Image (cartoon, grey):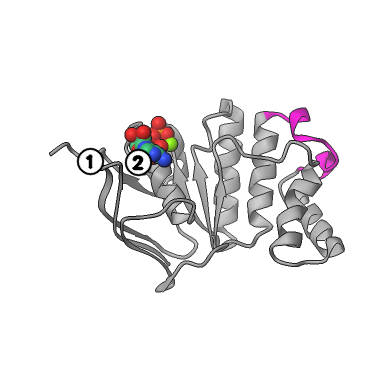
Amino acid sequence: MLEVKNLSKAFNQCEILRNLSFTVKTGGILTIVGPSGAGKTTLLRIIAGLETKDQGQILLDHEPVQPGQIGVVFQDFNLFSHLTVLQNVALAPELVLHQTKEQAVKRARQFLADLQMAALADQYPYQLSGGQKQRVAIARALAMRPAVLCYDEPTSALDPNLRQAVGELILSLQQTGLTQLIITHDMPFAEQLGQDVLRIEPVQER
Ligand SMILES: Nc1ncnc2c1ncn2[C@@H]1O[C@H](COP(=O)(O)OP(=O)(O)OP(=O)(O)O)[C@@H](O)[C@H]1O
Ligand SMILES: [Mg+2]
C-alpha cells in the first residue's frame, strides 16, 4: 500500500500542496486529476523522490519509500537519445541494480517483447512514434522493478487509438500486482480506466 500523509509543499512561500493525504492499495490504480498548476506534477516528483517535501510522509507498506521503489514515466518520456531502445531499457538495471550486461539485455528484451516493442529494439528514439517512445519509457521503468509506477499525463502525446492502447496496457499491468498512479487532464481516459479518482484543487489564496 502506498500512503501519502499530510503532504505539504510550497515554492518560494507559494503554497502548492496543503495537507494532502491519500492511499493506494497494492495493485491499485489511482487517477489524479485537477486543473493546470494544481500541483499534480509536483506531487508525482515528490513521491518519486525527485523533489523535496516541506511536510508529510510517503510510505510504502508502512515504511518510508526507498530510492528505486517508485518508477516514473515522464510526460516527454526522457529517453536517452544517443542510445537504442534496448540500451535505454538495459542501462539502469546494469548500472543501478548491478545486473550483468547479459542479464540486463536479456531482461530488457523480455520487457520490450511484453510491450510489443521487440522488433524496434535496435532503433533510436528519433525513429519512433510517440506511442512507441512511451512504451520504451514504460519498459525502462518496469525493468527497475518498481513497486509503484507513476505516469504524468500518459495520453497527452497520443492519438485516440494509442490512448486506448495505453489504457489497456495500464490495466494489464494491474494484473501483475503493480500499483499505479496516473496523472491526467483527460477525463474520458480516467473514466476508461474506471478506477479511483482523486481531484486536487489549487490551494486557495489566503
Ligand atoms: N521548481 C519549481 N520552482 C518554483 N515553482 C514551481 C516549481 N515547480 C513547479 N512550480 C509551480 O508549482 C505550481 C504547480 O506546478 P505543477 O507542475 O505541479 O502543476 P500541474 O498540476 O502539474 O500543472 P499542469 O497540469 O499544467 O501540468 C505551478 O504554479 C508552478 O509554477
Ligand atoms: Mg503537470
Q: CA distance from mark 1 to mark 2?
A: 9 Å
Q: What residue do we see at 56% from left, 27% from top?
A: 160
Residue 127 image point, x, y percent: 78, 29
**Position above or below: 150 against 189:** below
Task: Let me know if residue 191 appears in the view.
Answer: no
Q: Is mark 2 within 8 Å of ligand 1?
A: yes
Q: Is residue 122 left or right of residue 126?
A: right
Outermost top residue? 159
Q: Are marks 1 and 2 in contact (CB under 8 Å)?
A: yes
Can you identify the residue that label 2 sits on?
39
**Position above or below: 35 against 91:** above
Task: Let me know if residue 161 appears in the view.
Answer: yes
Query: Residue 28's quadrant in the figure?
Result: bottom left
What amino acid does circle 1 point to? Answer: Val
Outermost bottom residue? 62
What amino acid does circle 2 point to? Answer: Gly
Q: Earlier in the sequence, mark 1 or mark 2?
A: 2
Label ID, residue 122: none
Q: What residue do we see at 53% from left, 38% from top?
A: 154
Few, some or many residues within 10 Å of mark 2 (<14, 14–19, 20+): many
Q: What residue do we see at 39% from left, 48% from top?
A: 43
Label ID, residue 203: 1
Magenta part of the chain: 117-129
Which quadrant of the figure contains the C terminus? Answer: top left
Query: Residue 122's quadrant in the figure?
Result: top right
